[in-house]
Image: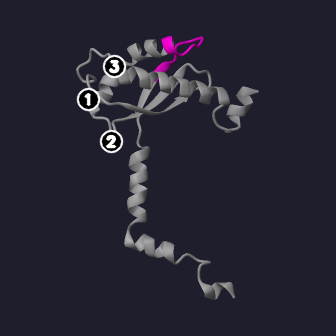
Amino acid sequence: MARRQQEAGSGPSQRQLRVAEEVRHALAAVLARGDFRDPDLAGAHVTVTEVRASPDLKHMTAFVSGLGKDLPEAQFRALKRAAPFLRTQVARAVRLKFAPDLHFQPDTALDYAMQIDRALRQPEVARDLASRPGDDAAEEG
């Protein structure tokens, strides 16, 4: 049943969503403690915005950013180097049959939202939005 659900493109299962959220919380807690030997991660403020789980729950992709901005490249590389340590910490916090492999991706959702906001604030776009079809009284008659 779960395999057919995935093939139909209906999105992640409830179990995937629940486990991914548990992993996000566990990963955020470990990152908040900041127990790292790597000097690039010492004092780093890393936000885990989302975690996506593979259907078999053996791989988790964590989307990360700095506090309201992109994570510096050095910290992003350090985070990837720390993946085995973070995997162990997450495995202790979240009870799963297998400790999931952690993969990190920069979270670009905030940048994209800001880009859309800037576009919507342009005078040409604002004018076009103000004069949308269907808003004119002449078209109502």
Q: Disc 2 residue type? A: Lys
Q: Residue furthest left?
A: 39
The stretch of residues the image draws in magenta is: 92-102
Foreground tag (2 vs 1):
2
Quarter of the image with the N terminus is top right
* Side of 69 where 13 appears, left or right: right
Residue under pointer 3: 81
Tell me: residue 32, above or below residue 138. Answer: above
Say which residue appears at 44% left-offset and 12% top-offset: 88
Residue 95: x percent and y percent?
57, 13
Q: Check disc 2 and report the residue beneath it.
A: 69
Residue beneath the point at 69% across and 34% down: 7
As helix, strand or loop, the secondary structure at mark 3 comes to helix
Residue 104 pos. (x, y %): 42, 28
Residue hosting label 1: 74
Q: Is residue 22 left or right of residue 110?
A: right
Mostly what secondary structure, the magenta segment?
loop
